[in-house]
Image: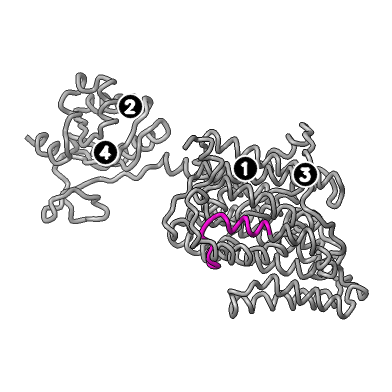
Amino acid sequence: MTPLKTLLVPEWLRSYRQADFPGDLAAGAVVAVILAPQGMAYALLAGLPPIVGLYASTVPLLVYALVGSSRHLSVGPVAIVSLLVHVACSKVAPPGTTAYLAAAVQLALLTGLLQLLLGAVRAGFMVNFLSRAAIGGFTSAAALLIALSQMKSLLGISGTSGGSAFQLATSLFSQLGSTHLLTITLGLGAIGLLLVMQRLTPRIPGPLVAVVVGTLLTALLNLDLAGVRTVGDLPHGLPPFAVPDFSLGQLLSLLPAGLTIAMIGYLESFAVAGIIADKEKYRIAPNRELLGLGAANLAAAFFSGYPVTGGFSRTAVNHRAGARTGLAGLITALIISVILLWFTHLFHYLPTTILAAIVIVAVSGLVEIAEARYLFRVKPCDGFTFLLTFLVTLGFGVEWGIVAGVIFSLLVFIWRSAHPHIAQLGWLEKEGVYRNIRRYPEAVVPSGMLLVRVDASLYFANMAFVEDWLRGILASCSDITHIIFDMSGVNDMDAVALSAMERMVDGYAERDITVAFSGMKGPVRDLAGRAGWPIKYGRMVGFLSLQQAVSELRT
């Protein structure tokens, strides 16, 4: 099969079995009844008309199912991306305006192009530089920001503004006097219903039940006339095709947000898709996922949507409901299309407070308190990365939060690589091995010898730390005549580290201290060979094991 045909015809479609259809049909229908209200709710969160959320739940799903590599990922509007869209587009135009909608479409276009570019150059590995601790802190804080931003609809007030928790809370408190009791009652009732159904009847789609109950109550009791805000009239018909505005200046202003959404969206999608794929024993292709999500976002841009990605909860529901292949996503898109064609009038009396309740309950699971505790217990440095990202996101907004998380993660990585673990080794007679004398105080250090193991690759940034460590040890041991490096933990060296090591060996030689190397791995041995070490230092760089080096240098 040609590469083009492989790209256009997904693996699940080439090998589709009739036995998979019942599961795909059931899962597609279940996800559709969840996605319809969620799509509208997330669109409101993004500052867009509810219909845009339904538009983003049709063609992008179809495109992803044909291009992506996951058989279970449920693509569409999600809370975190919707918040990022709102923050980015609010800087370009006021929410509710035509210019704001155009900016959201442009953001989908930009996100799609960036993901396609990353996929084409096989740059899926780049998400590995986004620390899980930083992402956890970001999503936890973003969930709280999302909940705060939805309080205006839940309480029936005119609106809240601001990008930080402080700004949102201040705006909210200033309007508490204008809350609408009936709206609050409906919203809190919906939250209670959703939480109870999550616990007692998880297989029944709670958002659909909340929407149906809220809509019926509003229509039968004329609650809209009593001040309860509703979705109102939604246009009929499939998503209209339109070429996005290619305003270069605006695209450049949206570029940081587009890159953030592209990376965060891919990371979220790849994480949940990988979990399901492991359970079902098939492989997720990282770069193919980037292509699939990029194509889905381009489809959203050309069919009046806004940025989409894979959702955690909907993907889990899709899997639990029996989905076997990407056909489930196609069925979901078909059902949403049917709703758009003939049933949008049913949402006229849907209270916006119900949609706010759906969002609040959906993001409540994103606050990862248990993850933070785990990180602090296992690796405090990662715990502080989580906490810093969390606090910056709350205090300064989502854009600064993710930037702070990435920067701090990189700083932690650089610090760790510049401060490698170094062990002084001693001999355990009973076990017949050399081990770290700090962990095994009974280990015997050979007289006059310093046995050193560096557990990291050596490069320009960490050689100074190695030299300082040696100076500290030698300052307290005046009888050292041999330093033997166990190089079994060194996978690579750069030219700067090699040169620094040569200077160190020559310097210790002037103090009548012999430096030897044992257990060099092939790539490091090749590097030393090209630098002329075998000629310059002879057998001192050729010991195959630490035991051999100690045995021969004792004599």
For the residues labelled 2 and 4, the Cα–Cα distance comes to 21 Å
Residue 241's mark?
3
Residue assigned mark 2: 498
Q: Earlier in the sequence, mark 3 or mark 4?
A: 3
Indicate which label's residue lies in the foreground, 2 or 3: 3
Q: Which amino acid does label 4 sit on?
A: Leu
Classify mark 3: helix, strand or loop: loop
Image depth: mark 1 or mark 3 in front? 3
The amino acid type, in three-letter code, at marker 2 is Leu
> Which circle's residue, 1 or 4, is located before the other in the chain?
1
The answer to whether one can see residue 407 in this image is no
How busy is the neighbourhood of tag 1: few (under 14 within 10 Å), some, or many (20 plus)?
many
Contact between labelled residues 3 and 1, with CB atoms less than 8 Å apart: no
Q: Name the residue under label 1.
A: 294
Question: In the picture provided, is 511 more to the left or to the right than 147?
Answer: left
Which-is-in-front pick, marks 1 and 4? 1
Q: Where is residue 145 in the image (x, y as percent from the top left)?
A: 70, 59
- Of pointers 1 and 2, the one earlier in the residue sequence: 1
In the rendered image, which quarter is residue 47 located in? bottom right
Residue placed furthest toward the left: 555
Q: Which mark identifies residue 441?
A: none
Residue named by callout 4 = 474
